[in-house]
């Protein structure tokens, strides 16, 4: 993974991440410039498959300050670039098994913007409580190791 732009930490709390995929994004020039300044938010974003294409919804890229008329709508659906075979496989899994496609992180890989996409299954409330308890116990162990 290259230079990290944004990460969706909430996704790891709300979902079990089964598999991860890398996808390119179809963006305009001003959106890329805004991303270079680190102006993106993945919270509450998700992906859906429509007519053999995959789109990221709720992925917020703030308008570029010097972009004026070239700026796009920050909340517009962004098309993801993946192989057709991968998209069809994901489509089958999402339709059948109750999986969700959740953007996990956004980063630069060379000059290109990439999105790490997770094939996720939703957590129940008790699973979330277990995650909190594990995080607290790990923090306590680290604290005692320091002393």
Image (tube, rainbow, N blue to C red):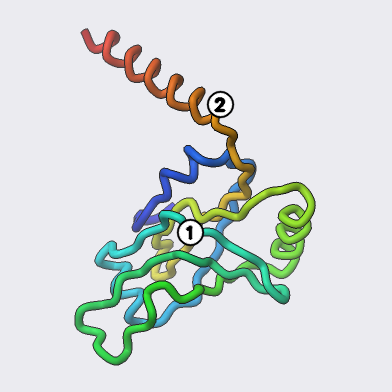
Quadrant for residue 102, please give it. Answer: bottom right
Q: Report the residue marked by disc 2.
A: 126
Please, what secondary structure does the residue beneath circle 1 have?
Answer: loop
Figure check: 105 above or below 27: above
Determine which of the numbered discs, if any, sits on residue 45 in the image. 1
Please, what secondary structure does the residue beneath circle 2 have?
Answer: helix
Figure check: 116 above or below 140: below
Q: Write the residue at 72% across / 73% down.
A: 52
Q: Write the residue at 56% across / 63% down.
A: 23
In this view, which residue lies farthest toward the front?
125
Q: Are marks 1 and 2 in contact (CB under 8 Å)?
A: no
Label 1 or label 2, whichever lies nearer to me, is 2
Question: Viewed as shown, does residue 46 lie left or right of 4?
Answer: right
Please state the horizontal and vertical placement of residue 146, each as a whole percent of the image: 24, 12
Please state the horizontal and vertical placement of residue 8, each as a whole percent of the image: 42, 49
Q: Nearer the viewer, residue 124 or 4?
A: 124
Quarter containing the C terminus: top left
Figure check: 62 above or below 144: below
Q: CA distance from mark 1 to mark 2?
A: 23 Å
Q: Write the residue at 35% across / 12% down.
A: 141
Q: Nearer the viewer, residue 21 or 2?
A: 21
Q: Nearer the viewer, residue 100 or 145?
A: 100
């Amino acid at each position: 993974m290259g230079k990290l732009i944004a990460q969706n930490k909430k996704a790891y709390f709300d979902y079990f991440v089964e598999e991860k995929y890398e996808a390119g994004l179809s963006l305009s020039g001003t959106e890329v410039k805004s991303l270079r300044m680190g102006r993106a938010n993945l919270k509450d974003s998700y992906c859906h498959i429509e007519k053999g294409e995959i789109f990221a919804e709720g992925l917020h890229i703030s308008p570029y300050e010097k972009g004026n008329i070239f700026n796009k709508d920050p909340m517009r659906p962004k098309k993801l670039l993946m192989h057709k075979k991968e998209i069809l496989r994901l489509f089958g899994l999402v339709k059948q098994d109750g999986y969700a496609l959740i953007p996990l992180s956004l980063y630069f890989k060379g000059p290109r913007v990439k999105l790490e996409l997770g094939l996720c299954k939703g957590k129940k409330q008790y699973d979330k409580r277990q995650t909190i308890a594990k995080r607290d116990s790990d923090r306590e162990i680290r604290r005692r190791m320091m002393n």
